[in-house]
Image (cartoon, grey):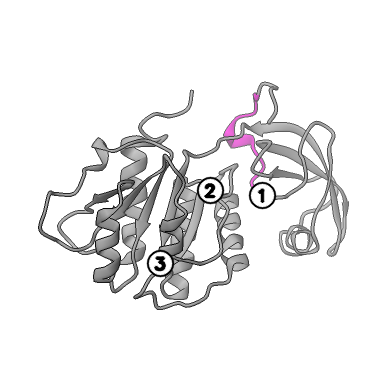
Amino acid sequence: MTDRPISMTYASRPKIRLYVEQPLGQGQPVTLSRDAAHYLIGVMRQGIGDAVALFNGRDGEWRARIASAGKRACDLTCEEPTAPQLNPPDLWLCFAPIKKARTDFIVEKAAELGVARICPVQTEYTNSERIRRDRLQAHAVEAAEQCGATFVPPVDDLQPLARMLDTWPEGRILYWADEAAVPGPPPTPLRDGMPAPAAILIGPEGGFSPGERARLADLLFVRRIGLGPRILRADTAAVAAITLWQAALGDWAHPAP
């Protein structure tokens, strides 16, 4: 991340933004992948001298200019920073994949709302037995490109819920979004919860099994939370839970200086 002052206003930032994996800095040359070059030159009709915003999730956003252009190859040169690196709070989203389009939606909105990691989990009632991690990662990248973010959350491989709980890292609270009303104490309001490191757990369309519910209720690092008086669809619940956590405990409530 650069320490140089960033004087360029948001309005003057290049409208086309691309995620790259190479380092970014003053005078740094960047060679785009074949797909990115085709998008920039073949689809967006950009040419030599045009400005593009680049980010890599580490060095903030940089204004770069096209130095050479071809539909299969494109080289750019970084000129100046246009936005600082802004990492989200250390919040993970753990969710059971659902139908393809709805899973895509969850990943996209998680990237936009600001999570640090996306963790698909296999539960007893999960309908999807496999995911295309590379495709979901591409959706996270696209969401970051479109919403002006400088961080892209990594998407993990699908893993069983039991394994995730067995290897849960010490010191990280897991907020379990419980869709069912059960006897016992009321759910913990998120405003009274603990800040990062934290995670949110969203179940599948059929909810958690009795065995999974019993185990979650017994774990000391799990906090049961409610999301209102109505049962929400899994994709809606993910967006609602992230929003509530961000507003109460995240960088919406305590924005970075």
Q: Quadrant of residue 109?
A: bottom left
The reply to whether the C-beta atoms of the residues labelled 1 and 2 are less than 8 Å apart is: no
Q: Nearer the viewer, mark 1 or mark 3?
A: 3
- Side of 77 relative to 17 (left or right): right
Q: Position of residue 1 (x, y in %)?
A: 68, 31
Q: Quick one: 37 or 129, which is closer to the camera?
A: 129
Query: Mark 3 = which residue?
Result: 96
Query: Mark 1 = which residue?
Result: 16
Residue sitting at 71 percent across and 37 percent down?
62
Q: Position of residue 180 (x, y in %)?
A: 18, 63
Which comes before the other along the chain, label 2 or label 3? 3
Look at the image and give the residue range highlighted in magenta: 6-16
Q: Quadrant of residue 179?
A: bottom left
Q: Position of residue 134 (x, y in %)?
A: 63, 66
Distance between mark 1 and mark 3 Cα atoms = 33 Å
Q: Nearer the viewer, mark 1 or mark 2?
A: 2
Q: Quick one: 120 or 12, which is closer to the camera?
A: 120
Q: Inspect the image, locate mark 1, and give the three-letter code of the amino acid beneath it.
A: Ile
Distance between mark 2 and mark 3 Cα atoms = 25 Å
SS at badge 3: loop
**Main SS of the magenta segment?**
loop
- Side of 224 relative to 40 (left or right): left
